[in-house]
Amino acid sequence: MTMKIQAMLDWSPEEKAVKAKEWAQSLFTLRLQKATGQLENPMKIKELRKDIARLKTAQHMSTAETAAAAAHETTAHEATSEGKIAANEKSAAGTAKPKAHAVASGKGAKKRAAAAKSAKKAVGASAKAHSPSKKSSGPSGKKAAPAKSKSAPAKKSKKK
């Protein structure tokens, strides 16, 4: 029952549709036989599924080829028309404008913008060289604990 895709490509769209319907019905029958324990060769299901997949691929390939051929015909027709080419060149020259940056919108846009600003400030502040303060390094040589940031998550209270 295994078929080659080349043979399927030669079929007309009507033949492909008829075969797809027929094979789907026979697949249903095989699955029903398997469920009732009457199926002699379970590999028939696998072969039929692959044949259906090949048929769908052949259908898709033929529709893609016809669409590509239609697109090619329209572009070839436009290329022979000199008036359209000149009009296309004029419109292409007039539409070359630089695009402005899009304004941030949507959920959380303000928070993201604020976070980006604070990240830039933090990078700029850490780039500057600071001498250690008197509080941070005392006579014992120990440094003070770092301060907690404001963006740290708050402790969650336990409900009883």
Image (cartoon, rainbow, N blue to C red):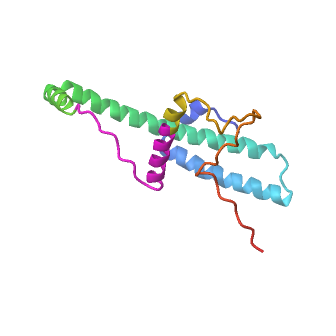
Instruction: Identify the magenta region.
Output: 96-121
x, y percent for residue 109:
44, 51
Where residue 16 sits in the image (x, y, percent)? 54, 44
Residue 104 is inside the magenta segment: yes
Q: Relative to the observer, which residue lies in front, 141 or 155? A: 141
Residue 129 image offset from top left, x and y in percent: 54, 27
- Quarter of the image with the C terminus in it: bottom right
In which quadrant of the rendered view does residue 34 lie? bottom right
Q: Is 105 rendered above or below residue 85?
A: below
Residue 15 coordinates in the image, percent (x, y): 53, 44
Q: Is residue 145 magenta?
A: no
The one of 85 and 23 positioned closer to us in this rendering? 85
Residue at 65% across / 39% down in the picture?
135
Quadrant housing residue 3: top right
Q: Is residue 105 visible?
A: yes
Q: Is residue 112 left or right of residue 76?
A: right
Instruction: Tell me: 123 left or right of 44.
Output: left
What residue sits 69% from the left and 44% below the top? 49
**Which of the 4 image quadrants contains residue 6?**
top right
Q: Residue at x 40, y 52 (%)?
A: 105
Q: Is residue 125 above or below residue 156?
A: above
Above or below, comparing residue 83 to residue 118 in the picture: above
Q: Quick check: can you spot residue 11?
A: no
Q: Residue at x 41, y 36 (%)?
A: 66
